[in-house]
Image (cartoon, rainbow, N blue to C red):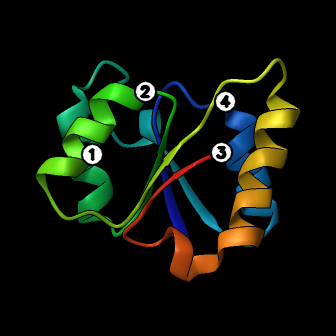
Amino acid sequence: MKFFLDHDVNDAVADALRRHGHEAIVLRDVLPPDAPDSQVFAAAQETGCVTITCNRNDYLALSAQQLHHGLIILIRRRSARTECINILRLLDRAGESGIANNINFA
């Protein structure tokens, strides 16, 4: 699967996704870190990616306004390792069909 990580997602999540065979695009590699959420979400849709963010309210509102490839709201944990574990567990549990075009929390 292809993922687009918002600026508030730890780099360790991108690394974990890549180690498990997924493509992970990090916002700062393609857009300025202060790009508005609407631009970030649009870039994820243009590249066919599931968006991963910790910014719950703004992205839930954006996802309600348009079709999307999927949205994962990452709940902040005390460690990046725990965040990685939760993302990978979600992917194992939900599978691609449960992630694509849906909203999930990890």
Tell me which corner region of the image, top left, top right, bottom left or bottom right, holds residue 57. top left
The mark that comes first in sequence, 2 or 1, is 1
State how far apart marks 1 and 3 are (Cα): 18 Å
Give the residue at x 18% y 36%: 38
49, 65: nearer the viewer:
65
Residue matched to label 4 = 10
- Image quadrant containing the N terminus: bottom right
- Which part of the image, by quadrant, shows the C terminus? top right
Dot 2 falls on a residue whose secondary structure is loop
Q: Position of residue 6 (x, y in %)?
A: 45, 35
- Which residue lies under the disc numbered 2? 55
Q: Amino acid at mark 1?
A: Phe
Q: Which residue is mark 1?
A: 41
Real-space CA distance between mark 3 and mark 4, rounded to the nearest whole angstrom: 14 Å
**Badge nearest the viewer, 2 or 4:** 2
User: Which mark's residue is nearer the viewer, 1 or 3?
Assistant: 3
- Helix or strand or loop: what does disc 4 sit on? loop
Q: Amino acid at mark 4?
A: Asn
Determine which quarter of the picture holds residue 68: bottom left
- Local SS, label 1: helix
